[in-house]
Amino acid sequence: MKFSFFHLMPFTGLVNEPRDWPVSNRDFDAAQAREHYRAYVEAMIHAERCEFDWVGCNEHHFSPYGLMANCNVIAGALVYPTSRIKIAMMGNLVPLNNPIRVAEEYAMIDCMSGGRLIAGLMRGIPHEYIAYNIPPDESWERQREAVQLILKAWTEPEPFGWEGKHFQFRQVSIWPKPFQKPHPPLVISATTPESAKFAAEMRATMGMVLIADLNQAKECIRVYRETAKANGWEPSPENILIGMHTVIAETDEIAKREMEKARSYFDRVLMGGPRTAGRLVLQKTRYYQDEANRERWQGRLAKREAATIDDQIAGGMIFCGSPESVVGQIKRVHAELGNGVFNFTMKVGNLPDEVVRKGMELFRDRVRPHVKDL
């Protein structure tokens, strides 16, 4: 079993509950952001000392939900203070960005780290398309074309031209190329059957986050495995990544109390603007290719927000409790889903950084020894 320490880099301390999109930045405090970045990067470096296998970064825009507008900048800050941990970019939103730039920057990170890059090539959640003025209806086409272009840029030994529907380049010949051959391992989000199918077609690890129903997760995994088989390959457990909001404390009571406060900030403040943008996208576009997936997305968020902490623990939506309780929760979800990677978001909402760090160390000392051999 592999474990990833994932960080959203949220902006904390906001009193107002934003409901508009984009979220006004009138309350942004640069001095506070400076302290956030320092504390968050230090926590991500500390993940190696806490025996995590991966440290995860991602990309979000126009919201206090996440301050990591360019996750590659954070990856660069992690390369040299660490030596063993995989740098898991989960990741660049390739439909919104220049795919050649993504290919180049990922190759830089892979070379600088000596081959420790996990390359996330993500589609992004609905509100990102409003932020970057990209038609959400084009998201699937753009992602497929961008991934194909990036893979060719990494593996083609001679200059080539690219004349696609969404991206055109007269000549491509990137320097550097990746350290890992033929290219770094891929991660693609797979929280719906349609995205699980795409991840399998690209021979990428499937990633699922904010699970609201283990049965829906099982369905995505089934589609992923069947599609992989139809495309001539067999996924291993390590090709299935499950992301969980995670709070580990000395007792169940402390962990639940901290999670309740942190989840309130996450739902009320951090999700306010993105929730509004998501509704706009879903009402007016075909971001999802069929109505069932549209309803699944809306139902997933509503179900999570309506559930109590105990409901979420019982439903396999979060990990929360003492080390001993979390060991049991990990074993249960793994037995249900057969995954080989857990991706822990331990900075949930405005959870204090000292609580996060304590949880990381409890994971190392009292959780990991009991689950590392699953």
Image (tube, grey):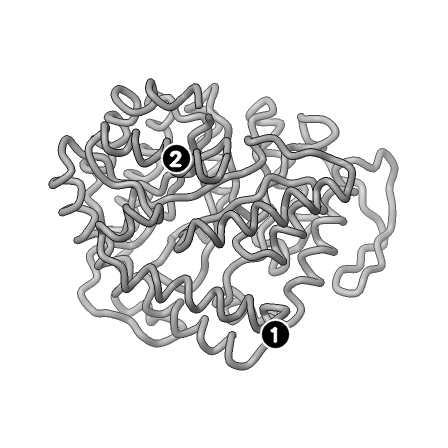
Q: Quadrant of residue 82?
A: top left
In-front residue for pair 286/103? 286
Residue shown at 23%/35% (left/top)? 248
Count of picture labels: 2
Type of the residue with mark 2: Phe
Left or right of residue 140, residue 341 in this image: left
Type of the residue with mark 1: Arg
User: How far apart are labels 1 and 2 at the CA level?
Assistant: 33 Å
- Residue 171 drawn above or below residue 267: above
In-front residue for pair 35/229? 229
- Residue 50 drawn above or below residue 342: above
The C terminus: image quadrant = top left
Left or right of residue 169, residue 356 in this image: left
Instruction: Tell me the SS state at disc 2.
Output: strand
| Residue underneath mark 1 | 286
| Residue underneath mark 2 | 5
Residue 319: give x, y in percent of width and height: 30, 41
Residue shown at 46%/30% (left/top)? 54
In-front residue for pair 208/165? 208
- Residue 187 drawn above or below residue 269: above
Q: Is residue 28 visible?
A: no
Residue shown at 31%/36% (left/top)? 329
Marked residue nearer the N-terminal end (1 or 2):
2
Task: Please rate how many residues cluster around mark 2, counting C-alpha atoms within 10 Å: few if below 14, some from 14 to 19, many from 20.
Answer: many
Instruction: Tell me the SS state at disc 1.
Output: loop
Q: Quadrant of residue 40?
A: top left
Residue shown at 50%/61% (left/top)? 125
Left or right of residue 68, residue 123 in this image: right
